[in-house]
C-alpha cells in the first residue's frame, strides 16, 4: 500500500509567510504558514487521497487489520516554517508525562483547557533537519563560563548584578536551574526589566549574534523573562541538511527557517517564555534538564547509497534523508512510513510495484510490506518510520 496524503498549513502567528509556499512552488496565501502536519494526530490529521475523503487517523483505524498497519502512528512528521521565534519550551519524559497526565485527569482539568500541561501520557522527543539554506534555533543551555562572559557584556545595572549573582554557583547544573527558577518567578520582575533594558546597549564580539537575537526578542516580548532565559541558551545555526535532536527536558525554541520535523506523537509542551500562552514555571522546572552542554546536534549515518539515516535511538521514530540524481536509492522500512519530498521530482515505488510521484511539499504513506522503497528521479525526500525498540 502506497498512498498520497496531504494537509493544509497551520496559521500560527510565528509562521513564515513565504517559506512553505516557495517550497511548494505556489503563490503565498498572505497568512502566516507555520506547519504542515503529515500524520494521524487528531489536532490536524492528514487527508488520504484515495477518493474516500477520510483523514489518516480514520483511515488507519478502519484499514489497520486488513492492511497490517498499526491503528496509530508512533510519530508525527511536519514541515515547520518559522518566520518568528517559537516559545521557549521543554517536553517531559515518558514517566513524567504519564504521571502528569494522570494527575491532571484526576484533578478534572479539561484536556483542551489553556492551563492544561499534559494533554496525553506520551513523551515528545523531537528532531528537526534544516531544508532552508540556514535554520536558526536556541537549543540547550550554554556552558556556564561562557554565559558569565555574555552577562558581563550587559554592564553593571541592578538587574545584571542580580543575574550575575545567580550565576555564581560552583555546580553548573544546579546554578542554571536556580537561575531559571529565579527568572521565571515573581521576585525577579524588576531585575528582568533592567536586564532587558541593558541588552540594547550591550556589545560583545564573541556574542554579537546572541545579543542581536535578544534585542529582537525584547522588541517582540517586552518584559518577558523568556528574553533573559534565551541569553542562557545555545544559539545554533544549522546549514541545509544538518539536524538537532531535542530529548526530554532540554530547553529549545526554533527561531527562523524551514525544516522537516519529526517527533513522538504527543502534544505535551511546558513553556518558559516568549509566548502569550500558559507558562507553568514550576512544572517546567520539574522536567527541566539544566545540564549545560553544546548544541544537541545529530549527525546522520549513510545506510545505503544516497540514503542517510538520522537515528536518535528512540523507539518512536527515525528519519531517512534520500537524495536521488538519475539513479535509484533503496530504503528498508522498519514499519509504516511517511515520505515527503523537499526538492526536485521523486518517484517512489514499493515492493508491490505501486508507484507515486512526489513534487516538493507532497507526501505519501507506505505500509511496511512495501519495503524496500525504491526512490528514483532527481530530487530529495525525507522518510519517517519507527525507530529502534
Image: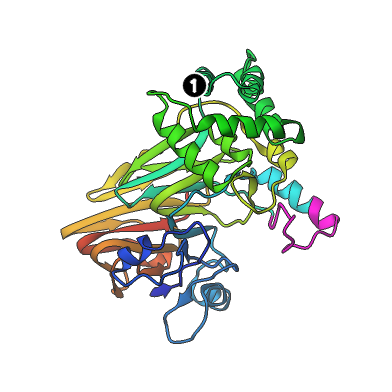
Q: Nearer the viewer, residue 21 or 210?
A: 210
Q: Residue furthest right?
A: 107
Q: Position of residue 284 (x, y in %)?
A: 68, 41
User: Residue at 35% across / 52% down in the picture?
Assistant: 320
Q: Residue furthest top?
A: 170
Q: Residue furthest bottom?
A: 51
User: Residue at 60% across / 40% down in the picture?
Assistant: 226
Q: Could you tell me what secondary structure mostly forms the magenta stretch?
A: loop
Please, what secondary structure does the residue beneath circle 1 have?
Answer: loop
The magenta span reads 103-120
Residue 109 inside the magenta-drawn segment: yes
Residue with the mark numbered 1: 153
User: Residue at 60% across / 56% down in the picture?
Assistant: 266
Q: Residue furthest left?
A: 326
Q: Position of residue 209 (x, y in %)?
A: 40, 33
Q: Position of residue 281 (x, y in %)?
A: 71, 40
Q: Is residue 308 left or right of residue 220?
A: left
Q: Nearer the viewer, residue 250 or 82?
A: 82
Q: Quadrant of the N terminus?
A: bottom left
Residue 321 inside the magenta-drawn segment: no
Q: Nearer the viewer, residue 350 or 375?
A: 375
Instruction: Report whether residue 161 is seen.
Output: yes
Q: Quadrant of residue 280?
A: top right
Q: Is residue 310 left or right of residue 34?
A: left
Question: Measured along the vertical axis of the image, is residue 228 above or below residue 37?
Answer: above
Question: Measured along the vertical axis of the image, is residue 306 above or below residue 46?
Answer: above
Q: Position of residue 6 (x, y in %)?
A: 42, 73
Q: How is the image coloured?
A: rainbow
Amino acid at each position: 500500500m502506497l498512498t498520497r496524503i496531504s494537509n493544509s498549513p497551520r496559521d500560527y502567528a510565528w509562521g513564515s509567510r513565504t517559506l512553505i509556499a516557495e517550497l511548494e512552488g505556489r503563490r503565498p496565501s498572505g497568512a502566516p504558514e507555520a506547519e504542515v502536519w503529515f500524520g494521524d494526530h487528531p489536532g490536524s490529521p492528514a487527508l488520504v487521497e484515495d477518493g474516500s475523503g477520510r483523514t489518516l487517523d480514520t483511515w488507519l483505524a478502519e484499514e489497520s487489520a486488513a492492511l497490517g498497519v498499526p491503528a496509530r502512528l508512533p510519530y508525527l512528521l511536519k514541515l515547520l516554517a518559522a518566520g518568528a521565534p517559537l516559545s521557549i519550551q521543554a517536553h517531559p519524559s515518558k514517566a513524567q508525562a504519564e504521571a502528569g497526565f494522570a494527575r491532571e485527569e484526576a484533578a478534572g482539568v479539561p484536556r483542551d483547557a489553556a492551563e492544561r500541561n499534559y494533554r496525553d501520557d506520551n513523551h515528545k522527543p523531537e528532531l528537526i533537519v534544516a531544508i532552508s539554506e540556514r535554520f536558526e534555533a536556541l537549543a540547550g543551555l550554554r556552558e556556564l563560563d561562557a554565559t558569565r562572559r555574555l552577562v558581563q557584556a550587559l554592564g553593571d545595572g541592578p538587574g545584571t548584578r542580580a543575574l550575575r549573582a545567580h550565576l555564581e554557583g560552583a555546580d553548573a547544573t544546579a546554578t542554571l536551574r536556580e537561575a531559571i527558577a529565579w527568572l521565571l518567578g515573581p521576585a525577579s520582575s524588576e531585575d528582568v526589566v533592567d536586564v532587558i533594558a541593558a541588552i540594547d546597549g550591550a556589545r560583545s564580539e564573541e556574542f554579537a549574534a546572541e545579543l542581536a537575537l535578544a534585542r529582537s526578542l525584547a522588541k517582540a516580548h517586552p518584559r518577558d523573562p523568556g528574553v533573559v532565559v534565551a541569553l542562557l541558551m545555545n544559539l545554533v545555526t544549522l546549514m541545509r541538511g544538518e539536524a538537532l535532536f531535542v530529548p526530554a527536558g532540554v530547553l529549545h525554541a526554533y527561531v527562523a527557517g524551514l525544516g522537516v520535523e519529526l517527533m513522538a506523537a504527543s502534544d505535551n509542551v511546558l513553556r518558559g517564555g516568549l509566548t502569550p500562552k500558559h507558562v507553568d514555571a514550576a512544572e517546567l522546572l520539574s522536567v527541566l534538564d539544566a545540564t549545560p552542554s553544546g548544541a544537541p546536534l545529530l549527525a546522520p549515518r549513510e545506510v545505503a547509497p544516497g540514503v542517510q539515516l538520522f537515528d536518535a535511538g528512540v523507539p518512536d521514530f527515525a528519519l531517512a534523508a534520500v537524495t536521488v540524481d538519475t539513479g535509484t536509492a533503496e530504503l528498508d522500512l522498519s514499519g509504516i512510513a511517511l515520505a515527503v519530498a523537499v526538492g526536485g521530482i521523486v518517484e517512489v515505488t514499493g515492493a508491490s510495484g505501486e508507484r507515486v510521484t512526489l513534487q516538493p511539499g507532497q507526501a505519501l504513506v507506505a505500509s511496511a510490506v512495501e519495503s524496500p522503497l525504491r526512490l528514483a528521479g532527481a530530487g530529495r525526500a525525507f522518510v519517517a518510520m519507527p525507530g529502534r525498540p
